Structures are given as C-alpha cells and as structure tokens.
C-alpha cells in the first residue's frame, strides 16, 4: 500500500492504533535514518495489521473509526507515525509521545543529508529545504525557487532530481501483512505482537487487562493516573500496574488479571473508588503507627493489594488496635524479607486465598511467613547491609520514630522533626566516612547500616567529621540517655576508630534486640508507651497532605521528572528496588530507574543514583544499567540519545562530527593549559585533565581524581568555567548566598554548588572560588 494511502486511511479511521500499543518513542536520529532510507529507496520493512470489526475494536485516541472493519497497527507504529508527522506536518490523532522528534526536518540539496532546523546554520544557506513544506506544497514551487536563485540554478537539474526523490516518498509502497480471522482473539493478537516485537518491550498481562477495560471505559487510564498523581503529591510514587493489581484484588479477590475479563465498567469504577479509600487508609496506618511516611522507606508495595483486600472484607474498619498491629507486623516482615519481590502474582494469589475467609486470616498469613522464613526473630547479622538501598534501612528509620530516639544536642524526641517530611532530618554516619577512608576501609564498610543514625541538621553540622571519641562523651554528659536512645554501645573503648568493626557488631546486637521487642509488641497487641499515631499523609477527605519542605534530593528528582515529562519521555520509577534474579534479594534501591530504557525496547536500562557509594553503582551497572550520579550528566545523555538534540548548544553550533573536528577540537585542546593554569592558581587542590571532546557537548572536564567529584567544566564556545564541588546541602546554600552577593551565577543541586564563571569575572571572583574549593576538599561530604 502506498504511503499516501496509508496516511489517508488513518485520517478516514480505517487504520488505527490498538489501545494496548505503547506511545511513540523514536528519537531524531531514527527519524533521519528512516527518511534517508526512503530517499535512497532502501527497504524499510513491512507493516503488520490486525483486521477486526469496528464495533469491537479497541483503538487509541479520539475520532471515529470507519464502519465495518478497521486495521489496527501491530507492527510499524513508529514508522507510520513518523511519516504521518513529516508528510502532514502534525502528529496523527492517536499520537502519544514527543512530537519534536519529527518536527522541523530539513534536507540539504548539495550534501543530501537530513537534519533538524537550526536557524543560524540554515537561514543563510538556500540549499536547506523544509521537508514537510516541500511535500505539502509540491515540487513546482520548489523548482521555481531554485530557478529564481542564481546561487542554485547552476545545479538546478541535479537539485530538482533530489527534490523529486523526496516528494515521491509518499508514493513508496509498504508491504502490509494482515492478521484476520474469528479465532484471532485479543489474547492471540497480543501474543503475535510480542513475538513480532521480539527486540522491544513485551506487553504485560496488565497492559492487556487495561486494553480490555479501555474498550468498556475509555477514560480508565486517565482516572487511574489521577489517583497516582494524588499519591505523588503526598510523596509516594506508584505504577499504573500496581494500582490495577490493587483494584483487581479489592474487586475480585484475585491476583491474576484474567479475573477482570468479565467486569463491567460500573463495577470497575466503583472498585477504583473503594481501592483509593483503602490505600489512603493503609498509607495513614503505616505512616502514623510505624513512622514510614515517605517513599524512600515505604517498601513492600505489592503487599498493598492484600492489605486493601483485607480492609475491604472488613468494611474498611479494623476491630481494634490489636488487629491493626498484627496486620502491620505482617506488613513489616513482608518488607524485610522481600515477600513480593519475586513471582508477585503467584505469591499474592496464595496470600489472597488465606484471607478469603475473615476468621483467622491474620493467623494464616503470619503462619505462612513462618513456614517460608522459619524463625521470624531478627538476628544481628540481618543488619549487615550497607547504604540506603538495604531493606533494613526503613526498619532503622522506623525504630527511630516508634522508640522516640532523641536528638543528641537538644534531647528532644526526633519524631517531632519527621512529621510529613525528612527535610529537617539528616542521615548521620556515627564514624565519619572521611575518617574511615583515611584508614583504608572500603566504601561498603564505611556505609554499613550499623554506622547510620538520624539527627537534626543542626546537630549533624555540629558533629561534622569528628570522631566518636571526641563528640559522644560531650552529648552523653549534656543529655544523659540520648546515646542509648540511638542504640549506641556505651563502652567508650568501642568509640575508638580502631575498634570500628567491634562497634558495628555491638550495635547490630542492640538494633536486633530493639527490633524484636517492637515487633513482639505488635504481635502481642501491646501498645508501647508513646507510640501513638503521629502522622497523616492523606487527609480525611482523601486529599494529599503536601510536605511543606521536601528533601533537596526529592526536589532534584522531581525537577528531573518534570523536565522529562515536558519532553514527552517516561519519568522513571521512583525508588526502584533492583532485585538479584538468582537470590531474590534487593541489590539496591535506585533513586530513579528506567528498567525498560528511556525509549522502551529501543535503549538500555538507565539508572539515576544520587549520593550512593561506588560499589552500589557497580552493582547496578553489573545488571546492565547505564548509571548516572549527576542530573546534569543524565540530561546531557537524554538530549544526545533519546531526543537527538542539544538544548544547550547555540544555533550555529557544529552538528556533525566533521564540523566538530575542524571548528572546535583545536580550540578546546589549545585551551586546556590555560584552563589548568587558571584553576590551579586559585587552589591547593591539584586538578588533572579529564577532558571529553564530544561533538555534541564539546567540554573539558577537570577532576581532582577523588570520589569527591570536585570538577570544572570548560566549554570553549561559551567561554566560561563551571565549578561544581560537592558540599553539604547547608554549606552549599551558605556559599550560594555569598555568590549571589558577588553577582555570580550559581545554583545548588544534589548538594553540589554549581557556579558559572565567565572568563572576564574570573580574577574578581578568584578569592571566593579559592575558599569554596578548599572547603569542598576538607568536608566529609567530599568522600
């Protein structure tokens, strides 16, 4: 079928996109490649369509379908959408993605290349032709332009032949394979789709269930996404498939999505509202009773369908605090042991069967845990984990709240500082990482879970990087009992840095004892003194309780997600738990992850890890992820790979490797010595060159070679330096105030102070920059 006919059929509603198809994911490089292949008359593959009756067709997007039958695209969406966007100059009605990927495509008459519009580069060169305008207006007007321009008419015939090759792209025939027959049910078609798209993202059972629901309730995705947005506003990040699984459990009592096949739209709407209320209650229970009031420490997300079903069977009300606490006892153990980290559907189906009959349901759930785990008492060795990615990190946070650990400086209970946000609390290393590093301990040893506690920012800054032998006696004398409230071993000999390993072992014993005491009080229904409900994350009317001030890391991540959303890209999974496929154990919690890639099925998995030790980065990379520890570097990657563009470049910046090598590399290399001399003149830290001559970003990076990642960017075309040392968040904010007063352009992201310094201002700001770099090399946060 001719390309032009295919596009006309889309406008007529006789070719459409099935509801279960994912959105448009191609980038500009793929668009250019397709157009170049068509221009050169290379084969670009066939299409696959499913011919199905219009009345039962589940198509995406607005607009009426043609009567009789409709052809739903199973394979070829990216190619057809690209061609439609270029030929019509607008996306098709079923479009869902980043429209900038195919807008503004131009063709160079002499070089025969396709590139996207760059004003400074193209406006002065009449050989650049707008491809969409050419196809829409036809060959005649373009020919007249060539003949009228003395700069072009000498090569008029050659250029006209090339223009003709572009205008005839709409006449190219694409072979179409058809899936037809009464035996081709939706399940069969999805299986065909998955087999054809063997190199791409497979459709899940959840996708299939949503496709069926979309046929009877077109607004189902929007309604479910509205609930997820509400939870995001309260600081919790869930996936669409997770909510669908919870609704399925509440409505049918089943784990498998096939249970939704015979559900009516009214039944599903009512179940969605009920599920929302049950999840609201669960979040408030966990936040209020356990203190787990933000996403980083929530854990065991796939226990929520079971918890929601349990509440639904009891009319949304638990009998008393004893039933509540025993239910939370079960929840904590599913979190600690990764009950739902493996075969979620199978395990959830087993547990849902256990609660089908109300009498004795909790006894059966807890008995099943014991059957799987054996002894449910915690052992000191369970606290051997490292980093905030460990499953026992939320338990440490929970103990701090429920046992009312006290701030060392003020002696006040820390739970009052945690309400609704972590913004007034900091994770504290009892033995400073910088001191441990000096003694040759590995990253995992420095970041041992038993070396963590929580303090107010004020106290954390006061402690700084002093050793326990120096500061612990001060606080013990000033506020008796505050150290014990953090399960600090009180033998002063263990506070010596040479006894660090012994300190960790002793503290693991104390943490295990405190954990077991609290868990046994939940199981026995004994409410510990002062452990009353103390947090609400969803209000009584179902509205999110917004945090007055979020952690800086949360702000950085949300800004990054908003940046992605504005570009039509997936915003990633917050706090994604990466599971070891062999053991089922959690390897690390990733701040922001794209397990299927930024372009699902077309790119590798991507991870954004902020302020995590190097060994965890290596673990994530070992699972096939491209890892980023800096938002700016991540955004550079997105611009160059997912979007095929560079927002930071000037309009006349080089866009080909050839032009880069001739116009920029020489300038960059010549500047290296000058940049090093300027930087090394203002600091005792000796920077070395770690330059990257990239034809898109063309910058020089300077590093001090340590994990502090104190580095400086130099962009030759912009003539400025960017100095970006990592500091404590509070320190960085203080420097920002001084820089603002000095008239410097600066901001703070992820504890990193970023200062853009124009060459003309370098001498004036030299003393201040010297202070900043020196401070960064001395602080604990540079490790």
Image (cartoon, helix red, strand yellow):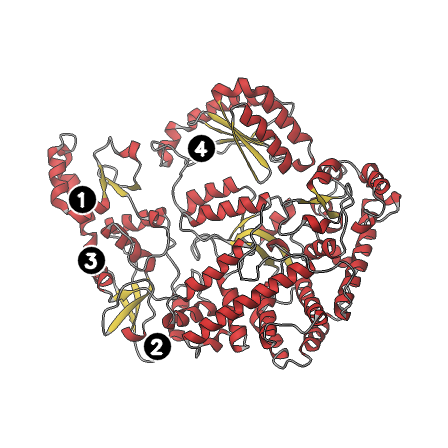
Q: Residues within 10 Å of mark 2 (few under 14, many from 20)?
A: some
Query: Which of pointers 3 and 4 lies earlier in the amino acid sequence?
Result: 3
Q: Is residue 663 above or below residue 108?
A: above
Residue 72 place in picture, x, y as percent: 30, 67
Find disc 3 in the rendering and name its residue.
4
User: On screen, 621 above or below 244?
Assistant: above
Q: CA distance from mark 3 to mark 1?
A: 17 Å
- Badge 3: few (under 14), some or many (20 or more) residues near its Cα, within 10 Å? some
- Among all residues in the image, which is located at the extreme front? 541
Residue assigned mark 1 = 163
Q: Which mark is residue 184?
A: 2
Circle nearer the N terminus (2, 3): 3
Considering only order in the chain, which callout, 2 or 1, is on the residue closer to the N terminus? 1
**In the image, 584: left or right of 442?**
left
Q: Nearer the viewer, residue 781 or 583?
A: 781
Q: CA distance from mark 2 to mark 4?
A: 53 Å
Tag 3 near tag 1, CB within 8 Å: no
Q: Earlier in the sequence, mark 3 or mark 1?
A: 3
Q: Residues within 10 Å of mark 1 (few under 14, many from 20)?
A: many
Secondary structure type for disc 3: helix
User: Could you tell me which residue is drawn at 32 percent across and 62 percent down?
Assistant: 61
Mark 1 residue element = helix
In front: mark 3 or mark 1?
A: 3
As measured in the structure, the alpha-carbon distance from the residue carrying label 1 to the one carrying label 2 is 43 Å
Q: Is residue 783 above or below residue 179?
A: above
Tell me residue 311's x, y (percent): 60, 72
Q: CA distance from mark 2 to mark 3?
A: 28 Å
Q: Earlier in the sequence, mark 2 or mark 4?
A: 2
Q: Nearer the viewer, mark 1 or mark 2?
A: 2
In the figure, residue 152 lies in which quadrant?
top left
Seen from this angle, which residue lies furthest top?
763
Judging from the image, what secondary structure is the residue with disc 4 in? loop
């Amino acid at each position: 079928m001719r390309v032009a006919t295919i596009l006309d059929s889309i406008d007529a509603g006789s070719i459409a996109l099935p509801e279960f198809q994912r959105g448009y994911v191609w980038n500009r490089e793929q668009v250019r490649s397709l157009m170049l292949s068509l221009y050169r008359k290379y084969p670009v593959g066939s299409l696959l369509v499913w011919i199905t009756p219009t009345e039962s067709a589940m198509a995406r997007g607005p607009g009426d379908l043609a009567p009789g039958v409709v052809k739903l695209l199973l394979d070829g969406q990216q190619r057809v959408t690209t061609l439609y966007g270029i030929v019509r100059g607008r996306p098709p009605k079923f479009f869902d993605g980043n429209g900038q990927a195919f807008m503004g495509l131009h063709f160079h008459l002499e070089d025969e290349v396709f590139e996207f519009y760059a004003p400074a580069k193209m406006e002065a060169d009449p050989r650049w032709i707008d491809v969409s305008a050419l196809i829409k207006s036809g060959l005649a007007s373009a020919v007249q332009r060539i003949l009228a321009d003395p700069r072009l008419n000498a090569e008029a015939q050659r250029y006209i032949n090339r223009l003709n090759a572009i205008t005839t792209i709409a006449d190219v025939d694409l072979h179409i394979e058809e899936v037809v027959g009464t035996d081709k049910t939706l399940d069969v078609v999805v299986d065909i789709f998955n087999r054809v798209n063997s190199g791409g993202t497979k459709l899940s059972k959840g996708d299939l269930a949503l496709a069926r629901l979309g046929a009877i309730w077109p607004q189902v995705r929007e309604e479910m996404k509205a609930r997820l947005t509400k939870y995001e506003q309260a600081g919790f990040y869930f996936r669409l498939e997770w909510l669908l699984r919870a609704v399925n459990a509440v409505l049918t009592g089943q784990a498998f999505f096939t249970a939704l096949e015979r559900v009516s739209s009214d039944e599903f709407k009512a179940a969605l509202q009920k599920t929302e209320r049950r999840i609201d209650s669960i979040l408030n229970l966990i936040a209020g009773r356990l203190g787990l009031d933000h996403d980083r420490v929530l854990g065991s997300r796939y226990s929520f369908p079971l918890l929601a079903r349990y509440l639904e069977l009891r009319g949304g009300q638990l009998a008393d605090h004893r039933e509540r606490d025993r239910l939370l006892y079960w929840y904590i153990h599913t979190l600690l042991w990764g009950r739902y980290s493996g075969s979620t559907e199978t395990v959830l189906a087993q547990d849902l069967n256990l609660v089908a009959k109300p009498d004795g349901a909790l006894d059966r759930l807890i008995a099943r845990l014991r059957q799987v785990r054996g002894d449910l008492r915690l052992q000191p060795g369970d606290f051997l984990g490292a980093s905030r990615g460990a499953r026992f990190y939320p338990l440490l946070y929970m103990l701090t709240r429920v046992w009312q650990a006290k701030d060392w400086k003020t002696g006040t209970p820390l739970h009052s500082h945690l309400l609704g946000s972590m913004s007034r609390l900091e994770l504290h290393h009892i033995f400073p990482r910088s001191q441990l590093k000096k003694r040759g301990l590995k990253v995992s040893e420095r970041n041992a879970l038993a070396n963590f506690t929580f303090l107010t920012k004020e106290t954390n800054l006061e402690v700084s990087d002093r050793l326990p032998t120096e500061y612990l006696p001060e606080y013990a004398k000033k506020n008796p009992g505050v150290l014990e409230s953090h399960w600090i071993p009180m033998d002063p000999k263990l506070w010596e840095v040479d006894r660090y390993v012994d300190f960790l072992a002793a503290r693991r014993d104390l943490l295990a004892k405190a954990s077991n005491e609290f868990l046994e009080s939940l199981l026995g229904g004994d409410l510990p003194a002062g452990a009353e409900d103390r947090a609400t994350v969803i209000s009584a009317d179902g509205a999110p309780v917004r945090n007055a001030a979020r952690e800086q890391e949360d702000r950085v991540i949300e800004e990054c997600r908003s940046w992605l959303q504005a570009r039509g890209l997936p915003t990633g999974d917050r706090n994604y738990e990466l599971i070891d496929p062999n053991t089922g154990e959690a390897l690390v919690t990733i701040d922001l992850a794209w397990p299927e890639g930024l372009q699902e099925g077309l790119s590798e998995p991507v991870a954004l890890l902020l302020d995590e030790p190097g060994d965890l980065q290596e673990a994530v990379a070992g699972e096939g992820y491209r890892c980023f520890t800096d938002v700016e570097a991540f955004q550079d990657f997105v611009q160059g790979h997912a979007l095929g563009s560079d927002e930071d470049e000037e309009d006349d910046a080089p866009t080909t490797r050839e032009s880069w090598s001739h116009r920029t590399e020489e300038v960059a290399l010549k500047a290296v010595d000058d940049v090093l001399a300027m930087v090394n003149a203002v600091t005792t830290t000796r920077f070395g060159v770690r330059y990257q001559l990239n034809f898109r970003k063309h910058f020089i990076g300077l590093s001090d070679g340590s994990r502090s990642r104190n580095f400086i960017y130099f962009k030759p075309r912009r003539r400025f330096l960017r100095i970006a040392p990592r500091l404590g968040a509070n320190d960085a904010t203080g420097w920002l105030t001084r820089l603002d007063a000095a008239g410097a352009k600066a901001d703070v992201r992820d504890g990193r102070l970023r200062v853009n310094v124009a060459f003309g201002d370098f001498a004036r700001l030299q003393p201040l920059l010297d202070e900043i770099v020196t401070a960064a090399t001395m602080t604990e946060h540079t490790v």
